[in-house]
Image (cartoon, helix red, strand yellow):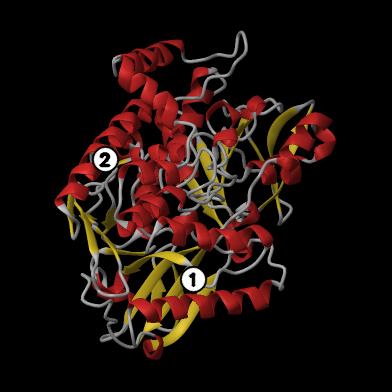
Amino acid sequence: MPSSEILVLGGGTNGLSAAFRLAKAGHRVTVLEAEATVGGAARGWDFAPGFRTPGLAHVLHLMDPRVIKGMGLKLDLTPLPSIALAASGDHLTFGGTFGSTLTGVSDAESKAWADLRAKLLRFAGVLAPMKQMAPPRLASGAGNETLKLLKLALKMRLLGADDFRELLRVLLINIWDALEDELTDPRLKGLVAFDTTLGTWLGPRSPNSLILLLNRLAGEVDGNQAALALPKGGMEAVAQAMTTAAGAAGVIIRAGAKVARILIENDRAVGVLLDTGEELRASQVVSALNPKTTLLSLVGPRLLDNGLVTRLRHQKSRGAAAKLHLALTGLPDFRGADLKARLVIAPSSNAVESAFNPVKYGEVPSAPVMEILLLSLHDPALAPPGHHVLSAIVQYAPHAPKAGEDAARAQMLEACLTQLETFAPGIRAQVAHAELLMPYDIEARFGMQGGNWHHGELSVEQMLFLRPLAELAQYRTPIDGLWLAGAGSHPGGGISGAAGWNAAEALLKAGKA
């Protein structure tokens, strides 16, 4: 019966980062991945003959610098400007890092944006260290990282009294009000509102939505705060680089190894049972899978406190983002926009809110908003010569549609194509094949509960020491020897590796490995 000192469940970016960190600390580590290839949301696939998408995610903006440096990742990154598309062709270009350069707006609007941008980046920079630490728990003897918390508190106080009060104010307001107070251009407001709510179950008017923009801006790429980039080879190149680094550190990676059950003996995790019947024993089990899957399915409610089971079952995990892939017979024309940029269809903050409203009731929006990349312009190998791959994250999509899954998927595809035709006339005739993954499709393929990309909604009541639940916030579970290391834990999802790295650090600090 094979054995390993530590088993890591899930070969996504969090599983790989956790495995690498533990292996570098001198432990024998095996990663178990249910699919034939590792990578999670960064795993690529062919969606039509000759056409490939290099991952569910398609833009890098949250990669943890500890992971990049620690794993020695050499990523060839192309910075991505954003273009807020206008149906008239009067586009707004959001250049540099988070709109450090802005073209297509008045001087007054440019000045207003520069002031708002500086404030948001300043606040996000203050909060950024929270991503790289176990969230504090409000309990005595909770094992909080006191020194780091003191440094964070000092950094906040050094903002000055006015900025400190402003930070406390904006943490709990919505992005709609902030944009209405400061800006006038609907394209600019639409773009920022879209970025704030991307991948969430929130609209711009939803309470506490602005904190999600600060969370997004706290990320960095290649040392640049709030930057967006496209890795050469796409997201699957990030997964491949991490896999190579983990292997070089001595991590054993077993693909096609689906865990059926976590083995518990005397209230302690002692290994796993694979669906083939094979048992693997370990001193510690680290799960980078969804917290609900880990505890409710692989451990089982019988071995857990009834209150914890109830709270975990009620943890919100509604996905509202769909992923669209189009195989195109030619290059579309988005009314003269730079096709190598990140293209965003979100004409106004009201358009973003209007797209969210139907989804609350299980319905499909008539005018979805979306983020678009023409990936084949960056990597011609993704499509046959003269053809192209369009990849789009589309909001909002119902995770539990009233019309039924097949009907909702067809309605959503039609709404997407209609919206695209408005901004790129003639594109519908160029579509040779379309693949649309609704939230329920994403759940089935990637194991994300509710199709939520963060393995649990990223909202103010499910962040920091409340993520995924207060008693699970520091990566420990009530089962001795079992740890959580996935996107459902702090600081959340995205191609980051932060949660996995944090969990490994917590395990090492506890002296459990």
Quarter holding residue 378: bottom left
Compared to residue 490, the image places residue 357 above or below, namely: below
**Mark nearer the N terminus (2 vs 1):** 2
Q: Is residue 167 above or below residue 41?
A: above
Residue at x-position 66% and y-position 25% = 471
**Distance from the alpha carbon under mark 2 to that under mark 1:** 28 Å
- Is residue 221 or residue 461 the one in the foreground? 461
**Mark seen at residue 117:** 2
Q: Secondary structure at mark 1?
A: loop
Residue reaching furthest to the bottom = 429
Residue 55 location, x and y as percent? 43, 62
Task: Specify the quadrant of the image occupied by residue 247.
Answer: top left
The C terminus - image quarter: top right
Local SS, label 2: helix
Residue at position x 69%, y 33% from top? Answer: 270
Is residue 405 depicted above or below 496 in this figure? below
Q: Which residue is mark 1?
A: 367
Residue 305 in view (yes/no): no
